[in-house]
Image (tube, helix red, strand yellow):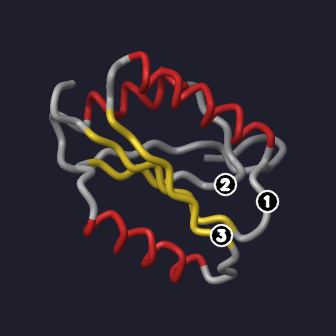
């Protein structure tokens, strides 16, 4: 994936879950192992998610990354899923994934 650079964007009001932190660490290791330039951007302390997202979007547009991944601060994922989405982003302008709601039984 030559020429791909990534901003991992995460609006955070207060805390980031342990599962999210572990997922992020593993994903960063996968990006490093693949030689993909990345940065993480966590906009902390904004209780209004749209304000936090706007600040992150502004930073992305002023920066040198060509992919942005919006990730909620309370989910977990596998690095290979992230890398598959990243690979798909070289073929499609917009990609996305869904995850289950915190319901029992899980809903999507």
Q: CA distance from mark 1 to mark 3?
A: 9 Å
* Element carrying mark 3: strand
Pointer 1 residue: 15
In the rendered structure, which disc, 2 or 3, sits on the residue that comes first in sequence? 3
Residue 68 circle label? none
- Residue 48 higher or lower than 62, as above or below: below
Q: Which residue is mark 2?
A: 73
Q: Quick check: marks 1 and 2 in contact, CB under 8 Å?
A: yes
Residue at the (42%, 16%) spot, across then down: 33
Distance Cα–Cα, label 2 vs label 3: 11 Å
Which residue, given by chain and number where applicable, does mark 3 sit on?
44
Secondary structure of the residue carrying numbered label 1: loop
| Residue 29 x/y as whole percent | 53, 23
The residue closer to the viewer here, 87 or 105, is 87
Q: Quadrant of residue 78?
A: top right
Q: Could you tell me residue 79's position as x and y percent?
A: 53, 25
């Amino acid at each position: 994936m030559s020429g791909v650079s990534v901003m991992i964007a995460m609006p955070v009001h207060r805390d980031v879950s342990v599962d999210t932190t572990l997922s992020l660490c593993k994903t960063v290791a996968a990006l490093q192992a693949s030689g993909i330039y990345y940065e993480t951007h966590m906009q902390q302390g904004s209780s209004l998610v749209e304000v936090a997202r706007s600040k992150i979007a502004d930073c992305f547009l002023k920066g040198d990354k060509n992919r942005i991944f919006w990730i909620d601060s309370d989910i977990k994922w596998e690095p290979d899923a992230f890398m598959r989405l990243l690979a798909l982003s070289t073929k499609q302008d917009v990609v996305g994934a869904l995850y289950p709601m915190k319901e029992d039984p899980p809903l999507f």
